[in-house]
Amino acid sequence: PAMSVTSPLKPTVPAERAGPEKIEAVHRIVDEETLGLVFQPIFGLKTGEVFGYEALARSPSPLFETLPDLYEAAAQAGRVGELGRLHRTQAVRAAPAKPLFLNVNPNEFDYGWLVRPDDPIFRHRQTVFLEITESVPLSHFEQCKGVLAEVRKKGVLLAIDDLGAGYSNLKYIADLSPDVVKVDRDLVADLRDGSRQYKLLAAIVQLCRAMGARVVAEGIETVEELLAAERAGVELCQGYLLGRPGDPGGEKSWPAFR
C-alpha cells in the first residue's frame, strides 16, 4: 500500500494492528459483498422536502464495534479501496432518484479506486457528494486534493463532514472549496437562540456562504434545535427528529409541526 502523506499539524497515531480474525472477516465481507447499507434523509429547510440521502455503510460482523474499526482493518488487509468501492456500488444501486451523499474513508486516498472511470459514483443520475471528515485535509491533504480534483471535473461535488467535532484547520478546508459543509452534532445539541453556541453556528454559516458552501446541520433531535438552526441560517438538516437511517421508502416531507 502507498504511504500516507501527513501534515505536521496533525501527527499520525499508529492504529492498533487488527488480529487475524478481523483480517479474515474483512476478506469475507469484500469477497462475499455482505456490507450492510442504510439511508438517512437530508431535508431542505425552505422546501420541507427531502433534498437527498446519505448512504451509510454497516458492518455485518460483530467483530467490528464501529465502522472506522472495519475500515482500519480493511486498510491493514490491503482491501480498503475495494471496500469503499463495494459501498458505492451498493449505494448507487439502491439509491432513490435524489442527490446522494457518500462517505470516503481517509485510507481510500492512498489508492486509485475513486478516480477509475467506471466508478459507481459516475453512474448515479443525480448529484453525488463525496463526504470527507474535517480531519482528512490535515492528514491526507495532497492525495485528497488530487483525487477530488479528478472526480470534480466529472461533476462530483464535495462535502466536509463533522465540522466542529475535532480540531479543524480552516485554511486546509477552504483550499478544497467544499460545496457543502456538514456541522457536527456537538454544535447543534441543545442549540438555543442567543447562546454562544448559536452565535458560533451563525458565524460558521456566514463563513461557509462566503466560501460558496451550503450548510447541513447534523444530529437534529428536537424541534427547538431545528428552529434555532433555521434562524441561524442553516439551509439543510438531518437527524433522528426528521428521519432515522433505514430504507428510503416513499417520498418524505416535514412532520405536522411545520
Image: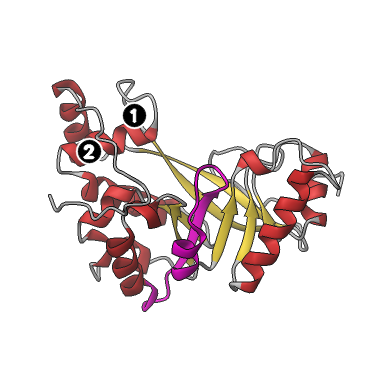
Of marks 2 and 1, the one in the foreground = 2
Coloring applied to the structure: secondary structure
Task: Give the mark nearest the N terminus, 2 or 1.
Answer: 1
- 119, above or below 82, in the image: below
- Specify whether 12 is left or right of 19: right
- 36, above or below 175, in the image: above
Q: Where is residue 110? Give x, y as percent.
A: 22, 55
Q: Can residue 146 be seen in this view?
A: yes
Per the image, label 2 sits on a secondary structure element best described as helix
Q: Residue 74 carries which label?
A: 2
Q: Residue 220 carries which label?
A: none
Q: How far apart are marks 2 and 1 (CA)?
A: 14 Å
* Nearest the eye: 29 or 195: 195
Q: What residue type is labelled 2?
A: Ala
Q: Are marks 2 and 1 in contact (CB under 8 Å)?
A: no
Per the image, label 1 sits on a secondary structure element best described as loop
Residues rendered magenta in the picture = 152-176
- Specify whether 64 is left or right of 176: left
- Specify whether 240 is left or right of 46: left
Q: Quadrant of residue 31?
A: top left
Q: Where is residue 191? Give x, y as percent.
A: 77, 41
Q: Where is residue 187? Give x, y as percent.
A: 66, 43
Q: Where is residue 26? Give x, y as percent.
A: 21, 33
Q: Is residue 155 magenta?
A: yes
- 74, above or below 135, in the image: above
Residue pictured at 63% horizontal, 39% vertical: 186
Q: Quadrant of residue 118?
A: bottom left
**Residue lying farthest to the front in this orientation:** 8
Disc 1 residue crowd, few under 14, some 14–19, many 20+, Cα 10 Å:
some
- Give the residue at mark 1: 60
Q: Can residue 253 be seen in this view?
A: no
